[in-house]
């Protein structure tokens, strides 16, 4: 087997806040993997909770949060190779009425958590947040279920190279 689990499932919880209202902000979360042992993180599930956008008269607003394996300069979505999960909440208005749309593209936890939804070969993952037309800074919470594993040398090399090339 190319991957051998070395831990029981555990949870990583974190949050990200915009540095200022409507400003793209990113954050790096270190998971302390040991590259000498070819350690990787098998991501079992990701749950996301983006903060609600403001309701502004006659103005569409939104908040977007994404989780990626490499750093990004924009919010990602699941069509991007390095994005593990993404959420966007929009408040659309016609000037009088407001409607909320929540697009959650996350890997939700399952009862058995047998399979993984992603592999992290580098020692960190990245969060991104950006609001649009909000009165104040926004953010979001992320909870990740994961298992540490050891990869054989060929698999580890391929995973690291693939992750670096997806930047």
Image: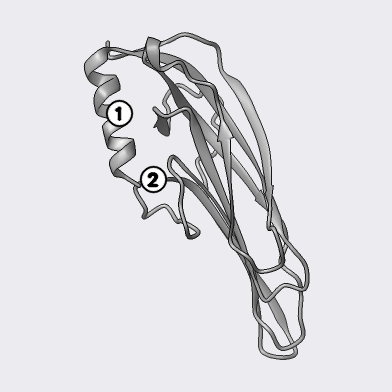
Q: Are marks 1 and 2 in contact (CB under 8 Å)?
A: no
In this view, 100 is above or below 104:
below
In this rendering, the answer to whether 85 lies above or below 163 is below
Q: Residue 89 location, x and y as percent?
A: 62, 64
* Marking on residue 82: 2
Picture coordinates of residue 103, whole percent (x, y): 55, 60
Residue plotted at (42% across, 30% down): 120
Q: What residue do we see at 27% from left, 14% from top?
A: 2
Q: Residue 137 at what x, y percent from top left? A: 74, 63
Viewer-proximal residue, 44 or 158? 158
Describe residue 89's horizontal placement relative to residue 67 as left or right: right
Query: Disc count in the image?
Result: 2
Crowdedness of circle 1 by 10 Å Cα count: few (<14), some, many (20+)?
A: some
Mark 2: which secondary structure? loop
Can residue 151 be seen in the rendering of this structure? yes
Instruction: Say left or right for 51 vs 71.
Output: right
- Pick whichever of labels 1 and 2 is earlier in the sequence: 2
Q: Is residue 78 left or right of residue 18?
A: left
Q: Residues within 10 Å of mark 2 (few under 14, many from 20)?
A: many
Q: Quadrant of the N terminus?
A: top left
- Front residue (pair 136, 47): 136
Image point 56% across, 30% down: which residue?
30
Q: Which mark is residue 149?
A: none
Q: Secondary structure at mark 1?
A: helix
Residue 112 coordinates in the image, percent (x, y): 52, 22
Q: How far apart are the alpha carbons under marks 1 and 2?
A: 12 Å
Q: Quadrant of residue 31?
A: top right
| Location of mark 1 (residue) | 159
| Residue 101 in sight from this viewpoint | no
């Amino acid at each position: 087997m190319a991957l051998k689990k070395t831990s029981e499932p555990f949870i990583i919880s974190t949050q990200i806040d915009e540095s200022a209202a409507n400003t793209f902000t990113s954050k790096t979360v270190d998971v302390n993997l040991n590259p000498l042992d070819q350690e990787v993180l098998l991501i079992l599930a990701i749950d996301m909770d983006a903060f609600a956008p403001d309701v502004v008269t006659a103005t569409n607003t939104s908040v977007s949060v994404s989780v990626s394996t490499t750093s990004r300069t924009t919010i990602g979505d699941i069509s991007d190779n390095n994005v593990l999960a993404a959420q966007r909440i929009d408040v659309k208005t016609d000037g009088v009425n407001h409607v909320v749309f929540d697009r959650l593209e996350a890997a939700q936890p399952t009862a058995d958590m047998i399979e993984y939804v992603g592999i992290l070969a580098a020692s960190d993952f990245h969060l991104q947040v950006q609001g649009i037309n909000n009165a104040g800074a926004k953010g979001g919470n992320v909870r990740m279920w994961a298992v540490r594993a050891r990869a054989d040398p060929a698999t580890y090399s391929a995973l690291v190279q693939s992750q670096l090339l997806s930047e």
